[in-house]
Image (cartoon, rainbow, N blue to C red):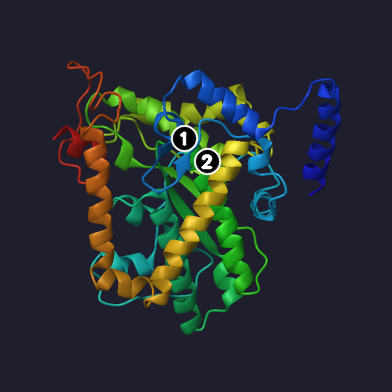
């Protein structure tokens, strides 16, 4: 809080430098934009709706977040330290609840440990949108904590030993907002158990959004993924090799490591605390993701919870609908560089048998 108070004091001081200029109201901004559109509709021309149901505006102003206590709560839930742990390898993720739900185990087997894992991959790789991914991750956490409690493990020990492995997609600003929203939602969840604890969030580059066609384009995707996770406030970061759909080469692993080193030492991301704080766009996105996630997970919880939702087939139905909509948008013109636009016929091609690859489905 001291850091944020200092920043706010500095911003107030900076504003005095511009006091000689008249402020432009929101209505004046909009009137000017509409005039410049010369008859075109503002909403149809300049706004767009994403797969989460969030409508993105062409510009955001201080009035979009000023005085909103919910925005302040999200800001206060973020990390107050800087830097992140660079992971060259990803340890095996032991998630007994996921094993039961997705890997064919006939029961949930849990034993006392100093580390319990929750992974959003299971949901992201099945096609979940950002809101769905966060919703299922929170519901997954609730089921796991309750199962640990039923097995005689104290709630505070369960929560303090949780680690969250979160997939990173390619929608840069949305992914930043996703990490910020997740941290707030987890702290809110912890408070419901009367636990005050900072969650450990590990960002993991998602293979779902990587291409097996012209795999060097994955270097761009991985850089975007890494930047969004770091700006969003991950505690640690792992990026797979750009040629992961072939046989990951040492060169590929080195390049993924170098992406993080460049972000850390040449772009100085490690020297900034909560770099997204105060961005009108990202703060507003974070709030909208929180609200839509909360609404989505409440609906599932009120109908019996996550396990029932999956076992009843409702989860599969929802994922099929999301994937169908997404693939349709790509086929109708949404650009994925190197996959449905700007293809390089001489590009490095990888394994065509991956079931986790969105770009294979688009291309096919």
Numbered badge on residue 204: none
Residue 12 falls left or right of residue 152 = right
Whole-percent x and y of residue 229? Answer: 51, 40
Please say if 181 is above or below 46.
Answer: below
Q: Which residue is mark 2?
A: 176
Disc 2/disc 1 C-alpha distance (Å): 6 Å
* Element type at mark 1: helix
Q: Which residue is mark 1?
A: 172
**Label pair 2/1, CB-CB below 8 angstroms:** yes
Residue 86 falls left or right of residue 269 = left
What residue is shown at x 55% (from left), y 38% (from top)?
Answer: 230
Q: Which class describes the residues within 10 Å of circle 2: few (<14), some (14-19), or many (20+)? A: many
Q: Quadrant of residue 251?
A: top left
**How many numbered marks have been drawn onto this rendered protein structure?**
2
* Element type at mark 2: helix
Camera-side residue: 156 or 282?
A: 282
Please say if 138 is above or below 165.
Answer: below
Whole-percent x and y of residue 86? Answer: 53, 39
Q: Which class describes the residues within 10 Å of circle 1: few (<14), some (14-19), or many (20+)? A: some
Q: Quadrant of residue 199?
A: bottom right
Residue 234 falls left or right of residue 95 = right
What residue is shown at x 51% (from left), y 80% (from top)?
Answer: 149
Residue 317 visible in the picture = yes
């Amino acid at each position: 809080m001291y850091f944020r108070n200092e920043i706010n004091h500095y911003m107030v001081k900076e504003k005095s430098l511009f006091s000689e200029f008249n402020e432009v109201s929101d209505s004046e901004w909009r009137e000017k934009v509409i005039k410049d559109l010369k008859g075109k509709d503002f909403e149809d021309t300049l706004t767009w709706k994403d797969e989460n149901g969030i409508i993105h505006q062409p510009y955001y102003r201080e009035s979009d977040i000023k005085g909103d206590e919910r925005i302040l709560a999200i800001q206060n839930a973020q990390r107050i330290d800087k830097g992140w742990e660079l992971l060259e390898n990803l340890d095996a993720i032991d998630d007994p609840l996921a094993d039961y739900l997705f890997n064919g185990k006939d029961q949930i087997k849990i034993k006392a440990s100093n580390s319990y894992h929750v992974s959003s991959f299971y949901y992201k790789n099945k096609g979940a949108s950002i809101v769905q991914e966060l919703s299922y991750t929170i519901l997954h956490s609730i089921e796991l904590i309750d199962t640990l409690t039923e097995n005689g493990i104290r709630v505070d020990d369960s929560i303090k030993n949780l680690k969250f492995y979160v997939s990173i997609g390619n929608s840069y600003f949305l992914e930043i907002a996703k990490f910020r929203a997740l941290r707030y939602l987890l702290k809110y969840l912890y408070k419901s158990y009367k636990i005050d604890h900072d969650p450990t969030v590990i960002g993991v580059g998602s293979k779902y959004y990587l291409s097996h066609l012209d795999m060097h384009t994955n270097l761009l995707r991985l850089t975007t993924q890494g930047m969004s996770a770091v700006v969003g406030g991950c505690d640690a970061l792992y990026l797979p090799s750009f040629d992961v759909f072939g046989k990951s080469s040492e060169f590929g692993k080195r390049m993924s490591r170098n992406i993080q080193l460049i972000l850390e030492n040449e772009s100085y991301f490690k020297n900034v605390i909560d770099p997204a704080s105060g961005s009108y766009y990202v703060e507003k996105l974070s709030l909208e993701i929180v609200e839509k996630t909360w609404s989505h997970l409440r609906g599932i919880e009120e109908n019996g919870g996550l396990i029932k939702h999956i076992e009843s087939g409702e989860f599969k139905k929802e994922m099929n609908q999301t994937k169908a909509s997404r693939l349709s948008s790509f086929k109708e013109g949404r650009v994925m560089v190197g996959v449905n636009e700007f293809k390089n016929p001489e590009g490095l091609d990888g394994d065509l048998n991956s079931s986790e690859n969105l770009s294979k489905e688009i291309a096919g």
